[in-house]
Every structure is written in structure tokens, then in C-alpha cells.
Amino acid sequence: MSLFAVINSIMNTFSASLLYPVIILLVALSLLSLILIGEFLSEYAKRNRDIENLESTCFTVQNHVKGSNFKAAADALRKIKQNYIVTAFSNAAAVHLEQDRIPAIEWVSQEYEIKMAKRLEQTRIITNIAPMLGLMGTLIPLGPALVALSQGDVVQLAHNLMIAFATTVVGLFASSVAYILTQIRKRWYWQDMADIDYILDTIEAKV
């Protein structure tokens, strides 16, 4: 047996051994996509942006900060009722504002920015990986399908083609769901970061 034949046999064996892990991963990503849809709907239901409340509260906070009344400023900051991320940031910032620890508030804002980026990474990874796995699931069965075609085994040919097409569809489904969720959440989080930056600028405006 030639070296090329040995290498070809090893590659074919390795490729075939990846089929079931790829299928399992695709099914897992599809189920995860459905779970993420549920989380997305839950997050959407919690979003409540009240611009008037934000502006009036920030105005009150700014006046208290200028008067160095940090306790009253912190109490006012806790009254912000916005999207849950902005509200959570306001409550966390109020703890530090009460003690006049402005740099700590900047650190908190950066932590929330990292949390948002981490949340987006989940769906971004699925968006990138799912099509790759779908392509692998498509190409791996094509080898046996061509062999079956050359041997006139129509049943085996149809079986392998069904696997190839199914993995493509499943991969595209998971990727499409993740892509849509990523784009919508990206817009949400940009809006949330704009509100957080506005609150931060209000607190830092001591002059």
C-alpha cells in the first residue's frame, strides 16, 4: 500500500469519525438557540426606557452632587427606573456615590460594559460556529454518498444525502437565530451604554 493510500485512509477514517460529534453539536446548538429565544423574549419584556424619568433624576442627582450632598444624590440615583441593566448600574453606582467614590463608579460602568459584551459573545459564537458545523455535516456524508452512487446503492446514497441536507438546514437555523438576536441586542446595549454614560457624566459634572 502506497503512502498516499495510507494517508487517504487515515483522513477518511478521521473525517467519518467526526460526523456524529458534529451532528450532536448541531442539535445542541439548535436547542440552545431555542433557549436563547426564550431568554430574549424575557429580556424584551423587562425593557422599559423612560427618558423623562432619566433626565429628571439625573438633573436632581447633578444638583445634589454640585452641593456635595452625596447621600441625597445616591438616594435620587436609586429612583432611576429604566431597562434592567441601567437600573442595576444605577443601584450599584449609588453605593459608591454615597461615599464620594467617583472613580469606582467609572469602574462599575466598565464592568457592565464587559457584561454586555460577554452576553453578545454567546450568540456571536453560535453565529460563526453553526455554519461551519453545518458545512462539515454536509461534506462528511458526501464521500460515502459518492461511493454508494458508484456502487448503485440508492438507499445508502439517499441516507447520506438526507444527513448532508439536514445538517445544513440545522446549522443555518441556529446561525440565523443567533445572528438576529445578536443584532437586536447590540442595538439595545448601545442604548443602555448611552444611558449609563449619561448618568456617569451627570455624576462627574461637579463644576
Image (spheres, grey):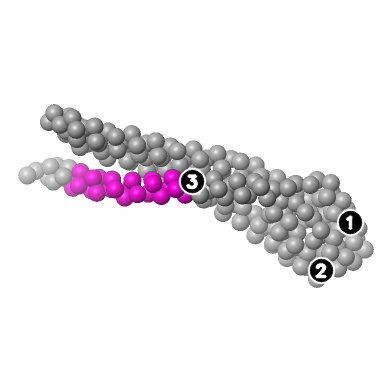
Q: For numbered disc 2, what is the local secondary structure?
A: loop
The image's mark for residue 140 is: none
Q: Residue type at mark 3?
A: Ser
Q: Residue at x 15, y 31 (%)?
A: 153
Would you place residue 122 above or below residue 174 in this image? below
Displayed quadrant of residue 164 = top left
Which tag, 1 or 3, sits closer to the chain's start? 3
Q: Give yes or no for contact between labels 1 and 3 (Cβ–Cβ under 8 Å).
A: no
- Residue bearing the label numbered 2: 98
Seen as rendered, the residue at the extreme bottom is 99
- Magenta stretch? 10-32
- Location of residue 115 with respect to 153 vertically, above or below: below
Residue drawn at 86 percent across, 58 percent down: 61
Q: Nearer the viewer, residue 123 or 3?
A: 123
Contact check, label 2 and label 1, Cβ < 8 Å: no
Q: Which residue is mark 1?
A: 60
Magenta span: helix, strand or loop, mainly? helix
Q: Is residue 22 magenta?
A: yes
Which quadrant is home to the C terminus?
Answer: bottom right
Q: Is 44 on the left or on the right of 125, as rendered?
A: right
Identify residue for label 3. Answer: 33
Residue 11 showing in the rendered view = no
Horizontal relation, residue 102 to residue 125: left or right: right
Q: Mark 2 and mark 3 in contact? Answer it, CB < 8 Å.
A: no
